[in-house]
Amino acid sequence: MKNPEQEIPGKNVVEIQGLWCHRGNLQVVKGLDLTIQQGETVAIIGPSGGGKSTLLRCLNGLTTFEKGSIKVGGESLLSGGKTPANKLRNIRQKYGMIFQDYRLFPHKNVLANVMEGPLAVNGARPEQARQLAEGLLERVGLGQFGNRFPNSLSGGQQQRVAIARTLAMRPAGLLCDEITAALDPERKGDVLGLLAELKAEGLTILMVTHEMGFARRSADRIVLLDGGTIIENGPPEQVLDRPRSERSHAFLKGVLG
Ligand SMILES: Nc1ncnc2c1ncn2[C@@H]1O[C@H](COP(=O)(O)OP(=O)(O)OP(=O)(O)O)[C@@H](O)[C@H]1O
Ligand SMILES: [Mg+2]
């Protein structure tokens, strides 16, 4: 799973400067700056509609932006949706995005879901792809589930297949959008435990989450996004226990109780 990019700690792997992005008639991201270093786990928190998903989608080229600059894993995304397709492919391969609703192929079994990326995008040989997929399913605790179809698995199991599928692209980092939001507490624990292991292995993880316990324990940094800008950005204890503004204080009081 090691990617050459993982070998250089301290290097900036995400650089966002002056990002502006609208959705429909709404200006969702308003001049946002953010830098993420190799190997960091950054939890993005904030009120609903604050722009968290939009920010992650911009980083993966799923949403276009009108102003500012974004660099991901050394590749620049261009405003106005002008990023060339081969660059987008590189970015998505290096920084895979995982969603709350898994998005597995329902008509393919679990093994085929995980093999799909290496076969279709990386040009792996079937036997190579199979070996890689079997190893990754073992890795996420689903070694026995290769022949099953997604709709016969629990939500937590499907989410772990989605993680294995992303890992099959040998990413340097993961962009996770509320990937435990639909899971019951035990399954949540499984998926968060897996993320903590991947962090320990050196992956860079950028995750939108409402799991404040996990954010406090496992994130290196918490970013609080509200109204399209970052209103807090620092180590968990600083952001959660000593927020700078009234607005952050009010939000955190609501989520931390
Ligand atoms: N395709 C779209 N068309 C129009 N407006 C959109 C679109 N996608 C998002 N928005 C709006 O952009 C704003 C930010 O949405 P976004 O999904 O980034 O918020 P979020 O912080 O992820 O919220 P949540 O915590 O509820 O997931 C919201 O007001 C949303 O309604
Ligand atoms: Mg969202």
Image (cartoon, helix red, strand yellow):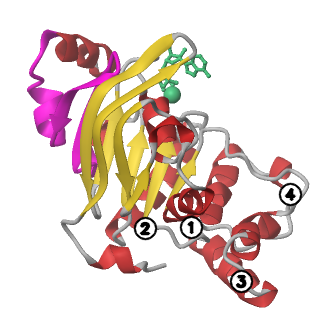
- Secondary structure category for the residue under label 3: loop
Residue 217 pos. (x, y %)? 26, 47
Question: Under tag 1, what secondary structure?
Answer: helix
Residue type indicated by callout 3:
Ala
Q: Secondary structure at mark 4?
A: loop
Callout 2–callout 1 Cβ contact below 8 Å = no
> Label 4 vs label 2: CA separation?
28 Å
Q: Earlier in the sequence, mark 2 or mark 1?
A: 1
Give the mark toward the camera: 4 or 1.
Answer: 1
The tag on residue 149 is 4
Q: Residues within 10 Å of mark 1 (few under 14, many from 20)?
A: many
Task: Look at the image and give the residue range highlighted in magenta.
Answer: 217-246
* Among numbered discs 2 and 3, the one appearing first in the sequence: 3
* Residue at 28% over, 31% down: 32
Queried whether the magenta region covers residue 230, the answer comes back as yes
Asked if the residue at tag 3 contacts the one at tag 1, i.e. Cβ–Cβ closer than 8 Å, the answer is no
Relative to residue 52, is residue 135 drawn left or right?
right
Q: Is residue 145 visible?
A: no
Can you give x and y, in whole percent of width and height, for residue 55 in the image? 43, 34
How much space separates mark 2 and mark 1, taking CA atoms?
9 Å
